[in-house]
Amino acid sequence: MKKLLLILLIPFFAISQTNPNREYWQTNKWTAKKGMNAEFETAVAKKTNKYNNTKETSIFTYQINTGPDQGKYMRVLGNRNAASFDEDNASEMAFWMKNVMPYVDSNDGNIRWWRLKGAGLNWDNDVPPARFLKMTTYNIKRGNMSDFFRFWNNNIKLQKELGYSGIIGVFMLESGGQGYQILEVEPYNSHAEGMGKFKDPDVNYVQEYNKMFGWRSHRNDQKAFNDSIEQWGISIETAELKPKMSSNLK
């Protein structure tokens, strides 16, 4: 059991081959022991302040607000390269084991993603983390990735053309999960303001799509997109940033 915890704990532990040209992100969801959320949060904050106080070592913590994982804490490592997985973090691990694990009930294990830079919109790694995240996970059928991305990439192209202000990050599963998974992340800072707006709020999106890609293309592309996703294959959850448990980069 101790060996298993060590593997789950170290964020840079590599269990699969990596690509040196990819930008990696990693998530892990943690559950605090019943009645010990405050102790868990304080311990994580101390660890983060001690070991994750630079851009290269930064970690951000969100708490899940909606969905079956509501209440869990999600630790996020972002914008890492493959060489990061070779680093020795024995001291960091020892601190976590001694000071944080006494308040941990369970964790879901590391999930590693790589960002599809061309599939996103207005994403900037230098912008501070948003207060809220909407995360949509798509489970794609084997052999249907082209149908999924045809509609996806067309939408991104059109949204750019129409001046959509929202931010979209797109990530593909590297390891730690099952099947062909795509994660869409939409950061935002206010529910009242929403996640983004078009330059023309009255734009007829379907009409503009068909104008750009051909007659009835929206209907046909959307159907192929929907058919490319497993029947059980879409999950949506939201999360809120926990600043004290996150790196404070000035």
Image: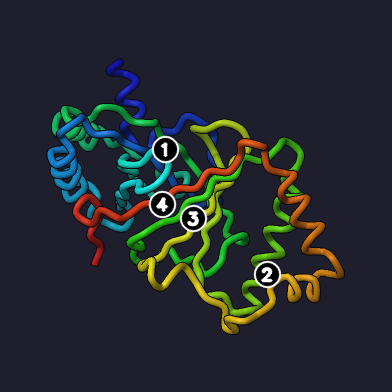
Decide: is 22 above or below 187: above
Q: In what element is the residue under mark 2? A: helix
The amino acid beneath tag 1 is: Pro
**Which label's residue is closer to the chain start, 1 or 2?**
1
Q: In what element is the residue under mark 3? A: strand
* Image coords of residue 244 (percent x, y): 19, 54
Of discs 4 and 2, which sits in the foreground? Answer: 4
Q: Distance between the residues labelled 1 and 2?
A: 33 Å
Mark linked to residue 157 = 2
**Which label's residue is closer to the chain start, 3 or 4?**
3
The amino acid beneath tag 3 is: Val
Which residue matches tag 1? Answer: 68
Question: In the rendered view of the protein, which quadrant contains the C terminus?
Answer: bottom left
Of discs 1 and 2, which sits in the foreground? Answer: 1
Which residue matches tag 4? Answer: 238
- Rendered image quadrant of residue 17: top right
- Please give the name of the residue rendered at 55% of the width and 55% of the height, measured from the top-left corner: 170
